[in-house]
Image: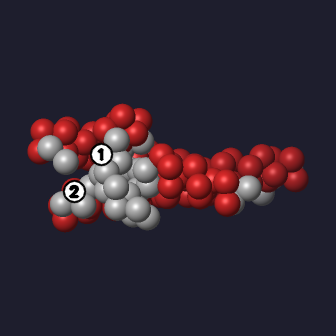
Amino acid sequence: MDKEFTQKMHELLSGMRDEIHGKLIAANADFRAIVEEMDPKDSIDVASDDVDRKMLEALGSQDMKRLRAIEAALLRIQQGRYGICLKCSCKIPHERLQALPYAVLCIDCQRNDERRNR
C-alpha cells in the first residue's frame, strides 16, 4: 500500500476516532445529567427517562464498536498490515477503504460472509 494513501487514511481514521470520543464524552455527560435530574415522578416520566437512557446506551455501544474497529485499523497501519484482507490476504481496493476506512475484508470475502450469515 502506498505511503501517501496510508497517511491519508491514518488522518481520516484519527479524525473519526476523535469525533467518536467527543460523542461518547457528550453522551456520558447527557446520561449523567438525566440520572441526576431524576426525582420522584409519575410512571410516564420514569418510562420516558428510561427510554432516553436506553437510547444513549445504544448510541454509545454502536460508537464503541466503531471505535474498536477504527483503533484496530490504526494498529494495522502501524504494523504495515493495513489494506490487507484478513481472510484471503489480498489487497483491499482503495475505493473500499475510502468508503469504509476500517474494513478488514475485501469485497469478495465480505460478500461470502454475508451470504453465509443469512
Mark toward the start of the polypeptide (2 vs 1): 1
Can residue 32 be spotted in the picture? no
Q: Residues within 10 Å of mark 2 (few under 14, many from 20)?
A: some
Amino acid type at image mark 2: Ile
Which residue: 43% across, 64% down? 87
Mark 1 lies on residue: 13
Q: Residue 50 carries which label?
A: none
Residue 11 pos. (x, y %): 21, 41
- Residue that appears at 50% across and 49% down: 108
Q: How many labels does the image show?
A: 2
Query: With 117 as the anchor, is 27 left or right in this view?
Result: left
What kind of residue is marked 1? Leu
Quadrant location, the C terminus? bottom right
Depth check, front residue: 102 or 88: 88
Helix, strand or loop status at disc 2: helix
Q: Do the residues labelled 2 and 1 touch (CB within 8 Å)?
A: yes
Mark toward the viewer: 2 or 1: 2
* Colour theme: secondary structure
Task: Measuring from the top left, give residue 71's x and y in whole percent.
Answer: 33, 59
| Front one among 101 and 85 | 85
**For residue 72, which quarter of the picture?**
bottom left
Residue 77, numbered circle: 2
- Which residue occupies 12% across, 39% down? 4
Inspect this view and state whether residue 30 appears.
yes
